[in-house]
Image: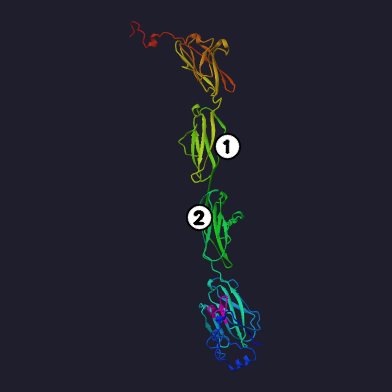
Amino acid sequence: DLPRLQITKPSQILHQTEPSPNQKGSQRSGHQRHCLPRRLWGPKMVLTRCSWLLLSAAFLGTRAEISITPEPAQPAEGDNVTLVVHGLSGELLAYNWYAGPTLSLAYLVASYIVSTGDETPGPAHTGREAVRPDGGLDIQGALPRHSGTYILQTLNRQFQTEVGYGHLQVYEILAPPVVMANSTELVERRDTLRLVCSSPSPAEVRWFFNGDTLPIAVRLGLSPDSRVLTRHGIRREEAGAYQCEVWNPVSVSRSAPINLTVYFGPERVAILQDHTTRTGCTIKLDFNTSLTLWCASRSCPEPEYVWAFNGRALKNDLDHLNISSMTAAQEGTYTCIAKNPKTLLSGSASVVVKLSAAAVAMTIVPVPAKPTEGQDVTLTVQGHPKDLLVYAWYRGPASEPNRLLSQLPSGNWIAGPANTGREVGFANCSLLVQKLNLTDAGRYTLKTVTLQGKTESLEVELQVALNLPLTHEDQGHSPEPEPGTG
């Protein structure tokens, strides 16, 4: 049987010229003899007097399976590649190599005549291809543009053609990609992160976070081609260094890191004393002691600080506040306000600072220390209770008949049974005794009661000196000299 004819497009048929005698005989027997197109096999291959079909017409005779494999199997750009042909059979006259999906002249790389070794380049020849006598195709210094489908068409002595297909993929030596971000400074839960792995080369992409492969939770935001990473409502734990890596079977290249900052807070604002949280507490200090309060919070960046005392802003923008020489005037509420300039959020914490009820051991000091008759003396009290409710002074033991005066919670004082009209009380518990006389000397007792009901008594001994008239010596005069002395 003669070969069948397969035509892809009717427009690709050329009109046949004068048939040969053999051809006429074939027609009488009901068969047609087909000729090969002259330009398919080159100008030197003149086989008949007839004209032939175009390249897309192929004889389909008894065929073996022809396969084409590249060596090396995964070449890199610049490698020398051979398309090795398997399954050739019979005595072959010629080869046609195509670099494309169809047997089209536009894809013809080269034609090769086996008997003469003549090779004719085609339109798709790049200057790097050479047909081998065994039918293979050598490509010197292959480039990525050489990738694609390759077709080998063979012609045997029975004018039968066979076709084999293969695929070549030439991989690029990849340049480092570049990670581009919509922003590298984002606010937590408010902003969206969008990272793009930019690379001109077709390659697989994988991402790295702080040097490790991307966590699964973050990978969920990858595009289908893995080149775009999107995170809505970015979280603080996603701040760090991001890299992308492009790879193919022969090359791998990683980008420089791009550092992402996520701003958050302030959160959990607290006031600390000696590393202990005191927020909302009352701190009691001894009189004339010092205190340092620290303001702490979880925030990025570090917040700006403002301190306030009893609602009034202080001139202090540090993360700590020093209270030195504690007095009653420094008792009150201290507040730290932390403000984040990036998130525009703020938080605060407060503590109450008070003097201790028994801040200092209470003492009584007479002023002057050695008063004389007729002078005034003040029994000055130091370290009186700051949460004082009432106090009372007594001449002698603390008993009602001896009471000189008492101060009420209103701040007013009232005279007691022993009051002579010369005694005056003060808010700090001190007692003034005016125009002393010798009978004022002796023991005095102060009794205090605090708001908590704590009672304390303290005694002091007052001495009153006799006011004697001045002598000549006291006045600075010397006695007259005795007669005869000289």
Question: How crowded is the residue under tag 1: few (<14 C-alpha within 10 Å), some, or many (20+)?
Answer: few
Please tell me whether residue 99 belongs to the stretch shown in magenta: yes
Numbered label tally: 2
Residue pushed farthest top?
483
Answer yes or no: is residue 71 visible: no
In the image, residue 439 lies at what x, y percent? 50, 8
Q: Give 10 or 129, whichever is nearer the viewer.
A: 10
Q: Give 68 or 418, whichever is nearer the viewer.
A: 68
Which of labels 1 and 2 is toward the front? 2
> Quadrant of the image for the N terminus?
bottom right
In the image, residue 46 lies at what x, y percent? 55, 89
> Quadrant of the image for the C terminus?
top left
Q: Which residue is mark 1?
A: 276
The secondary element bearing badge 2 is classed as loop
Would you place residue 119 above or below residue 260 in this image? below
Q: Residue at x 48, y 38 (%)?
A: 306
Q: Give 10 or 441, whichever is nearer the viewer.
A: 10
Please tell me whether residue 283 belongs to the stretch shown in magenta: no
The secondary element bearing badge 1 is classed as strand
Label 1 is placed on what type of residue? Thr
Would you place residue 481 above or below residue 383 in this image? above
In the image, residue 245 lies at what x, y percent? 56, 61
Range covered by the magenta-colored residues: 96-109
Q: Which residue is mark 2?
A: 182
Label 2 is placed on what type of residue? Asn
Q: Dividing the picture into quarters, in which one does residue 470 lie? A: top left
